[in-house]
Amino acid sequence: MKTAPMHGGVAAMRIEDYGFIGDLQTSALVGRDGSVDWLCLPSFDSASCFAALLGDSEHGRWLLAPAADITGVTRRYQPGTLVLETDIDTADGSVRLIDFMPRRGSGPPRLVRIVEGLRGRVPMRSSLSVRPDYASITPWIDIVPDGALATAGPSSFHFCTMLPLHVESGTIEADFTTEPGGRHHFTLGWHASFEHAPLVEDAESALARTVKWWRDWTGRCTYEGAFRDEVTTSLTVLKAMTDETTGAIVAAPTTSLPEALGGVRNWDYRYCWLRDSVLALEALLAGGYTEEAIAFRDFMLRVGTGDPAKLQIMYGIRGERRLTEFELGHLPGYEGSRPVRVGNAASEQFQLDVYGEVLGVAHKGAEAVGKIDKHLWPRWRAVIEHTETIWSSPDDGIWETRGPRQHFTQSKVMAWVVFDRAIRLAEQFDLDAPVERWRQTRDLIHREVCERGYDSERGTFTQYYGSAELDSSVLLIPIVGFLPPSDDRVTSTIDAIRRELGRDGFVSRYSTALTDDGLPGDEGQFLACSFWLVSALALNGRVGEARTLFERLLGLTNDLGLLAEEYDVAHQRQVGNFPQAFSHLTLVGAACAITAAESA
């Protein structure tokens, strides 16, 4: 079992017990017990300096908590922000922790923590264990006039506080007592070890600046449909998972949180998947965030064009292609879930669906700005023409299975999307293109999918041509417009997936027992697929069923509105990397689908 930080009787934390803060270039996970258990500096994909999430306190954390037993915890984000407030009660009184990461722009990353006394006199302690390079090293620590400096190789960590400090076994300790209305300030910054430590912004000034920035940003949200508060929360999470310097959206800020507790399905998600791209654009545009949507489109333009034969399913946040996967044997993993992985070998797979994502982004981006730059059209056209040569090939599929390649139904549907969106672009913007040839290819793919990807006896689209297995990814068929939502084949497919892949109303991606995905073990129910089911039901005219399922899914969020990748029905807890962009993207899409259906 995971020997996670324990303090004051608080047991090892579930994934949903964490809060999420970030500065638009990296992020941290803060537990209900006041421990920051995951932080990568200076970027989302940097090596961690706190990795207690995947081990225990010896692997790096920053605990800021009462010294006595905790009797109660409540928490929230300050309205319209990603500033986390955690109120902790003890027999001596109560305190409030205020955790945030100021937007840095071109400056250094900083994690700021403020402790405010609310009631009584509460003895507190700060215990900072910096363990760089995924807890592979203990830094050298010097006490300096404004705090402490921890240095290891290329990285230095500047810990600033006015409290007296002492060092024990590589951990920086401070003890203090809160008074009602009193505030204590702490800042942890990162800088290159060969540079001087930069000046440190006053914590209260940084708080005011951060609150204002986030409230200005959320105040721009134009979404006025159903479940507005939940949509705004999801958009805020997505913004915090967007690298403001490149426009890339990471799939999650964590690595190796398991899809099944104790299992081996543990992956590094700190990269940008093309799979999420169209959904990301739609979600951002639904909130009125055109600037962010175009920045993400431009990231896609940089990585998704060139030699289309070299298109990858995912990239680093700066567009890196080499994401070599390796294991960290010294980390025991979350609740013993091993191995812990860095990098992702799936980046080397062939997934046909990504070509549909690229054209979907091109189409959505052009619609958003009302034009397509003529000098960009040859890049998109190269992708289309390459897809003409490969669409009939088997691939590894949307779920990055590590079994044999197949003619996956969803992959072919997304190949259809390539030509459908290409035709729309060419006709809408009067572009030079062999539209009639593309129309013939589009129709050919459509006939083939309907003939070979559909089981007429069972009345459902299947995982791949000739298979008996089902796959929730075919719920995209009405969502991308491959078939009308009211088509009988769509209706029967929705029912078959609910019946055969459903568990307590939530759906799995596919049956791990029946599908040869090259991996042992099982996984939880996939939240994005469950939100796709909501959208498909709404489009299918079953709005009441869609709303009921959506509300049940909202019940799976933690107290801050955050979702991981999956939900383990048997253990009734979230599993997988956290927070998960795919879950929040599809939440926004499902809310939009319900809104559209109810207003039709």
Image (cartoon, rainbow, N blue to C red):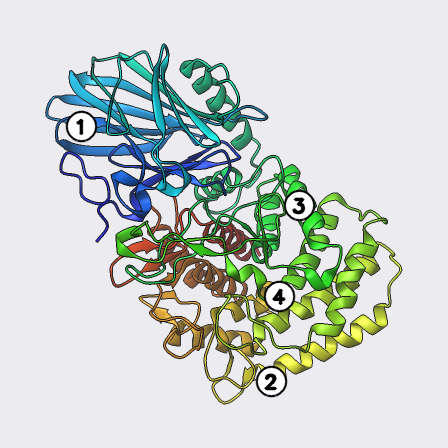
Say which element carries label 1: strand
Who is closer to the viewer here, 585 or 164?
A: 164
Q: Which quadrant of the figure has residue 389?
A: bottom right
Of labels 4 and 3, earlier in sequence is 3
Question: Of tags 2 and 3, which is closer to the observer?
Answer: 3
Amino acid type of disc 1? Asp
| Disc ID at residue 89 | 1
The residue identified by callout 4 is 353
The residue identified by callout 2 is 452
Say which element carries label 3: helix
Question: Does residue 491 appear anywhere in the picture?
Answer: yes
Of labels 4 and 2, earlier in sequence is 4
| Disc ID at residue 299 | 3
Marks 3 and 2: in contact by CB < 8 Å? no
Of labels 2 and 3, earlier in sequence is 3
Direction from residue 60 to residue 485 in the image, left or right: right
Q: Is residue 17 above or below residue 118?
A: below
Say which element carries label 4: helix
Q: Residue at x 36, y 77 (%)?
A: 513
Tell me how far mark 2 sits from mark 3, CA to CA: 35 Å
Amino acid type of disc 4? Asp
Tell me how far mark 1 sits from mark 3, CA to CA: 45 Å
